[in-house]
Image (spheres, rainbow, N blue to C red):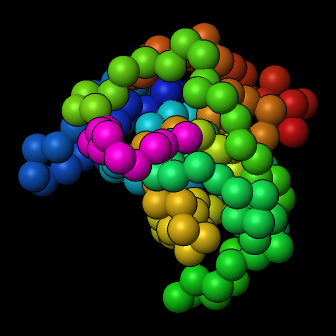
């Protein structure tokens, strides 16, 4: 099976934590499923869990080039040159990284409030961009936006491949069969 979870802010992408922080186990009580990839503690949005190793590999292995779409609320207003730089590629400490797509977007409709909210600065505008990548290195989108002068204030993974958080409130999930999941890829 494949479980699509809208992971809330400040939830670990694992099922237990010795420090008592919120984990996936606080939201999904389906035995035998494991994350197909990770999502940072301070990021929100879609995380996939599966009980099928082949499906997990197909979703999360870099060779599969599964697109992951992120909505990033950034500090500042993106310039065309900054968005183009994300698509050309930026140098990070662990090597180059590039987006397959990067564009300015309106604030996503129907977006839930984050608790706690992002910091507000009266003299510094914020805006939203959509970034699509096919890798998934540690804090990659945050590091990429920072590299072009657009620090990320809030990061939401909207979709992975054909699956999205559309219709899922934070902490809610839905399940599909492995057959349906493989057919969608």
Is residue 181 at all visible to an observer of this figure?
yes
Residue 125 within the magenta-colored segment of the rendering? yes
From the viewer's side, name the closer residue of 120 and 157: 120
Question: Residue 133 in the image: x percent, y percent?
Answer: 73, 57
Q: Residue furthest left?
A: 19
Residue 86 within the magenta-colored segment of the rendering? no
Q: Is residue 137 above or below residue 171?
A: below
Assign the magenta stretch its main secondary structure: loop
Q: Which residues are magenta?
A: 118-127
**Side (left or right) of 120 relative to 171:** left
Question: Residue 1 in the image: x percent, y percent?
Answer: 64, 28
Residue drawn at x 12%, y 53% is 18
Residue drawn at x 70%, y 57% is 79
**Side (left or right) of 19 relative to 80:** left
Picture quarter with the C terminus: top right
Quadrant assignment, res 49: top right
From the viewer's side, name the closer residue of 124 and 182: 124
Quadrant assignment, res 44: top left
Question: Residue 14 in the image: x percent, y percent?
Answer: 35, 48
């Amino acid at each position: 099976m494949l479980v699509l979870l809208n992971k809330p802010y400040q939830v670990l992408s694992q099922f237990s934590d010795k420090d008592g922080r919120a984990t996936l186990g606080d939201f999904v009580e389906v035995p035998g499923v494991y994350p197909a990839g990770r999502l940072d503690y301070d990021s929100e949005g879609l995380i996939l869990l599966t009980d099928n190793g082949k499906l997990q590999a197909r979703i999360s292995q870099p060779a599969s080039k599964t697109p992951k779409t992120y909505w990033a609320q950034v500090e500042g207003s993106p310039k065309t040159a900054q968005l183009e730089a994300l698509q050309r590629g930026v140098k990070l400490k662990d090597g180059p990284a590039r987006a397959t797509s990067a564009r300015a977007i309106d604030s996503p409709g129907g977006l839930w409030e984050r608790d706690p909210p992002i910091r507000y600065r009266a003299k510094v505008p914020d805006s939203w961009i959509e970034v699509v990548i096919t890798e998934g290195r540690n804090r990659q989108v945050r590091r990429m936006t920072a590299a072009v002068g657009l620090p990320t204030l809030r990061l939401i993974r909207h979709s992975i491949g054909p699956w999205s958080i559309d219709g899922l409130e934070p902490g809610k999930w839905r399940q599909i069969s492995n057959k349906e999941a493989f057919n969608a890829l």
